[in-house]
Image (cartoon, grey):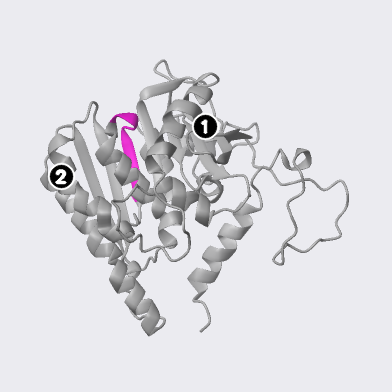
Amino acid sequence: MPLPLNRLIRSAFLIGLSMLITQPVQAQTAAAPQTALAAPNFAVPADWQPGQLSRTLSFELDSKHTGQRYRILVGMPHKPAPASGYPTLWMLDGLASFPITEYMRPRPASPTDSPQYLAKIGDEPAGLVVAIGYTNGQIIDVNGRALDYTPALPAGTKTGDALSPRHGGADAFLQFLTLELRPLIARHFAMDPQRHTLFGFSYGGLFALHTLTTAPQHFQRYWAASPSLWFGESFTLRQLSQRLPAMRLAAPTRVMVTVGMDEQYPERFASPEAKQRLQSRAMVDNTRLFAQQLGDAKLDKLQLESQSVAGHDHHDMLLHGARRVVEFAFAP
């Protein structure tokens, strides 16, 4: 069945953006082992270089907590930090999510900007973006993220994941973010300790909600796009009622939870198998139930928003969230 036009556009958009991601260590690392699925070699001029995004730094980092190696992208702010430091946006699946933010990220004024354009953009708030990806260069690393973004499950619990055998490293990954990566970034950029935002999509959205309900002190804003609450027989959702009575928010905390209606209730299903998969994962129902239970708890200092977006499937919600989370993170 041919892909609908909006799916083709979305796929081309993601592929095109991924080609722009900085890969500064490519010339210094050993050649990757050959596989049957190796990319073709193209005859291009020797002086052609890997594409780079402007105002973006990149480095690689090994984690003692997770045992994985990460490619970190840093989106530099467009003006000096306020007295309290920069609000900071931490983006999971960084090689996929970060390039989308480039369209929305504030940029420095240019000598060629017209007075009308400068008046339009106004005095945009400055912020820092830190995106976490993997060194294999895959914009969605199936195995890396399955390990890092999912919580440990009780013995005997089925993960429901048919693509990766590695799971349960969410707590170790949170230690990497807060005890390894954040102090490193803080050596070079002033960060507002009360304005950290965590953005995650799919398994990353699950990680965001797991962090919110187990260690909410590390971030003050959360954007969970299409959280995979089906994981582990809906473990995170089932644990919510037990965790809510003990949840204490040290600072005002803003939470956005989103899901696409086509993730469970499309106008038509591509196949009987697709219908069974979407209905068994119950993305819309689970996300709404999580948001309802969280809202009903009436936690002090919590500001909760939930969106069910018509005409959007699972992957659409990555674009939807990454496009909007910059304003969410940097707004006063």
- Identify which residue is drawn at 28% across, 39% down: 212
Q: Position of residue 312 (x, y in %)?
A: 38, 65
**Compared with residue 293, is residue 129 higher up or lower down, i.e. above or below?**
above
Q: Is residue 194 visible?
A: yes
| Amino acid on which the number 2 mark rests in the picture | Gln
**Would residue 215 be found to the left or right of residue 105 on screen?**
left
Q: Is residue 201 visible?
A: no
- Identify which residue is drawn at 46% across, 44% down: 92
Q: Quadrant of residue 135?
A: top right
**Would residue 62 be found to the left or right of residue 87 on screen?**
right
Q: Which region is colored magenta?
A: 217-224
Front disc: 2 or 1: 1
Residue under label 1, please give it.
Answer: 64
**Compared with residue 235, is residue 84 higher up or lower down, i.e. above or below?**
above
Q: Is residue 219 magenta?
A: yes
Element type at marker 2? helix
- Identify which residue is drawn at 27% across, 66% down: 282
| Amino acid on which the number 1 mark rests in the picture | Lys
- The answer to which of 319 and 239 lies nearer the viewer is 239
- Identify which residue is drawn at 37% across, 39% down: 171
**Would residue 119 be found to the left or right of residue 44 on screen?**
left
Mark seen at residue 242: 2
Q: Position of residue 257 (x, y in %)?
A: 29, 50
Q: Is residue 246 magenta?
A: no
Q: Looking at the image, do the residues carrying marks 2 and 1 touch, with CB atoms under 8 Å apart?
A: no
How many angstroms separate mark 2 from mark 1 (CA)? 31 Å
